[in-house]
Image (spheres, rainbow, N blue to C red):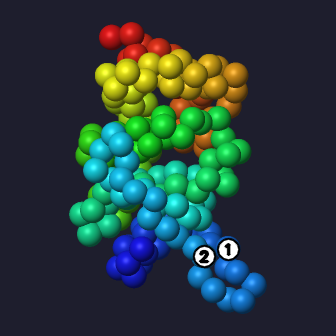
Amino acid sequence: MCRATFLALTAAGFVTSLTWAEDGEAPEFRIAGTAFYCEATIVIGPNKRGASSAAPQGKAVILYDPEIMATLPYLEPFVYAHECAHHALGHTSPAGLLREGHAFREKELAADCWAAETLVASGEANIVREQIELFRSQADQRSGPRYPLYTERAAKLAACALK
């Protein structure tokens, strides 16, 4: 990752909780490629949110931390489609995802819907069905305090996938 992109992600708060190696080296970040559902560059590395979107210097980026994501009820293709949705729907800025109170929750549901529609259109309805079941299995939990409940997200995915 180029230094400017790393600094922009740091300034946006995407890489604030870094774990430094014992020898004092900076954490590893690597570019994994381009997301299938959009033109965002996928960067693998530490991210306190698990997965998030940013647009440092106007370039779409998805920062993905496989260790944190492994603890959450998400399928990887769904996550990439969801994060692409934030770019496609204009939810990102050079400083990262725009997080505005109630609008944040609505943006998450809109990104879920875009992801469901995109996955179905790509012939990957099975991923949407599996994601719905994962969300339903989590009952009334959520990813964080401002996120919609998983049951609400499951309902939104089902409604969008059946359009």
Q: Is residue 76 visible?
A: yes
Q: Is residue 22 above or below residue 129?
A: below
Are circles 1 and 2 on residues that touch, CB within 8 Å?
A: yes
Label 2 CA crowd tier, 10 Å (few <14, some 14–19, many 20+): few
User: Where residue 142 appears, x then y in whole percent?
Assistant: 63, 35
Which residue is drawn at the image coordinates 59% and 29% (left, top)? 149
Which residue is drawn at the image coordinates 43% and 24% (left, top)? 124
**Residue under numbered circle 2:** 27
User: Where residue 135 appears, x then y in whole percent?
Assistant: 61, 25
Q: Secondary structure at mark 1?
A: loop
User: Where residue 10 appears, x then y in whole percent?
Assistant: 47, 73
Which residue is drawn at the image coordinates 40% and 38% (left, top)? 81
- Amino acid on which disc 2 is placed: Pro
> Residue 108 or 116: which is nearer the viewer?
116
Quadrant the C terminus occupies:
top left
Label 1 CA crowd tier, 10 Å (few <14, some 14–19, many 20+): few
The tag on residue 19 is: 1
Q: Is residue 100 visible?
A: no
In the displayed structure image, the side of residue 95 where residue 57 appears, left or right: left
Q: Secondary structure at mark 2?
A: loop
